Image (tube, rainbow, N blue to C red):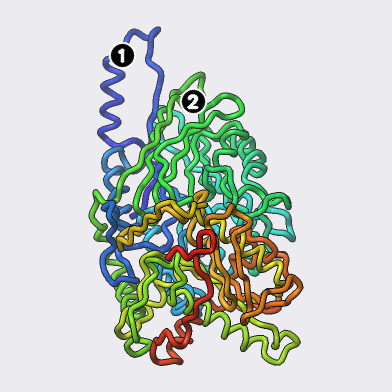
Amino acid sequence: MTVNRRTLLGASAAAGAAAAVAAAAPAEAKPAKTYSFSVLGTTDLHGNVFNWDYFKDAAYTDTAGNTRGIARIATLVKQIREEIGAENTVLIDAGDTIQGTPLAYYYARVDPIVADAGPVHPMAQSMNAIGYDAAALGNHEFNYGLDTLRKFESQLEFPLLGANVIDTETGRPAFPPYHFLRMRTGCGKDVKVAILGLCTPGVTIWDKAYVEGVLEFPSLESEAAYWVPKLKAMGADVVIVSAHSGTSGKSAYDTSTGLGVENASALVAQQVAGIDAILVGHAHIEVAESRVAGPDGHEVVLSEPLCYGQRLTRFDFDLTLEKGKWKVASVAASVLNSNTAEEDEEILAILSDEHAEVVGYVNQVVAEQAVVQLTTVEARYKDEPIIDLIAKVQEDTVKTALAGTEYADLPVLAQASPFSRTAELPAANVKIKDLSSLYIYDNTLAAKLMTGAQIRAYLEYSAEYFVQTAAGAEIIVDTNPDKPTDNITGAGSRPDYNYDYVSGLAYEIDIAKPAGSRIANLKHQGADVADDQRFVLAVNNYRANGGGNFPHVAAAQELWSESIEIRTRIIEWVTAKGRLDPADFASVDWKLTRDGTPVF
């Protein structure tokens, strides 16, 4: 479906305008000319085309009744276009589009779009079909390297924006910084709408291997301050920012080095005059409407629709023509739930083959029946074998890589996190989808040289994940598979993915103690770990580059790294074994205690 932005108002709107003229007061009291339009926005689609959970091989469901996928968003968009006229709508996205599901992974790595005569990415096909006007770059757009990103960009029929994604050689934006749209009003003067795209600077850390020396990511605030006045000077009546950056003003990394704030959308609104609305992304939370006072007192409206295509933001703009210039009279934001819509038949038709291809891929059996069922339901507070599998694969991979080097004899430790609370390896034939559900991110592996003192500091920082809990206090654990909860994890709103196991050691985490003094009885092969003892830490690239702001690891000497996903290494390891037996990987490395007494 192609949207023509260069058409006059539809018949119904024209009739309404004629009626308004007929009923107008005498010439000396003519009503002001007005125009209304809507900006629709998605963000963090993460490769979700259909309402399908490839890990469970079933339709996606949750206890809140949410649905996922751009196919349902397409239906909502069509409904609004029918309601107010397609010529009176703008459709934009705030990034993180090509990573996050087995569907997205398949067309990046298994049947890659960069191959000669490669396929068109499913997200490009669906977004083109719906008729997006522009999209901002998200940090996950860089996960598969710049060749994949550029190929995806070339397949889009709309611009991919990144005003603060700067080519280090030229000092100029490496992607279009903005996009202009002209809205036909029927009032004799068009409305010029400018879309400015911004991306979180965290790409510098998280995808360092791809962007270092090639791209720079200055702060959102500085680039918005540069570009917004230019857009106004170019005649923009309305300025909308599509920002892949949350509103909290916080970062999961150290900004003291000069790197911009990770979640800076509200800061942009507060510091930069001339912005009317900001479509927010990156934080994976729902913000229907937030109003922030700009530096000139002008109110900026922000909205973040829930990720994965679960929500669609709608900004409604009312403008008046004053002295030959359009002025924004009001802006309101709301979100629409995709569970009120059916999947669009056009999207179903054009992508059913790709969907079926990926379903077949994830259902491939890679190992004979597992010995026992393993789950992650309690993995955030108990040392579970299912997480040990990740650590064992990483240890073996790094040991193989360092064989024959001067570091070959150093003990190898491994970091792993409980990414999902619902992953399961069944006591049945093990399929790709089972292993993929255990490691849901496209992280790659690195090896860092660390000392015993640094490892202790790393563990202390990780242990801040736990709520300080006195020995006599009640611990509540609910292992409901739909939404397992407890009252001892996630202190300070720290997500599960920023809590790390470290295998290859034995230690206790005393949650009765204050943060910073919780690690007890830290031993390696039965002996106390010395501060100057040297270890190799097998660690994912997110953590190796500073993700989560864990101490020492980012600055530590890197001995080795690779571009193969850890998920792929797990699949290879299990395939080689032919059977999943905890005896091959499980180990008891740590336990929670309170004043030295085990919690469980």
Answer yes or no: is residue 203 visible: no
Q: Identify the residue at horizontal 49%, vertical 56% (top origin).
A: 495
Rounded to the nearest angstrom, the CA distance separating label 1 from label 2 is 22 Å
Callout 2 amino acid: Lys
Q: Is residue 52 above or below residue 326?
A: below
Q: Position of residue 567 (x, y in %)?
A: 48, 76
Q: Nearer the viewer, residue 535 or 313?
A: 535
Q: Quadrant of the C terminus?
A: bottom left
Callout 1 amino acid: Ala
Q: Position of residue 542 (x, y in %)?
A: 59, 65
Q: Which residue is mark 1?
A: 24
User: What mark, if any, has residue 414 been given in the picture?
Assistant: none
Residue 331: quarter of image: top left
Mark 2: secondary structure: strand
Q: Identify the residue at horizontal 59%, vertical 54% (top origin).
A: 515
Q: Identify the residue at horizontal 52%, vertical 52% (top origin).
A: 468
Q: Nearer the viewer, residue 230 or 539?
A: 539
Q: Nearer the viewer, residue 496 or 260?
A: 496
Q: Is residue 204 left or right of residue 90?
A: right
Q: Position of residue 307 (x, y in %)?
A: 40, 53
Front position among marks 1 and 2:
2
Q: Quadrant of the N terminus?
A: bottom left
Q: Position of residue 111 (x, y in %)?
A: 44, 78
Mark 1: secondary structure: loop
Q: Identify the residue at horizontal 34%, vertical 85% (top origin).
A: 370
User: What mark, if any, has residue 327 been given in the picture?
Assistant: 2
Answer yes or no: is residue 295 visible: yes
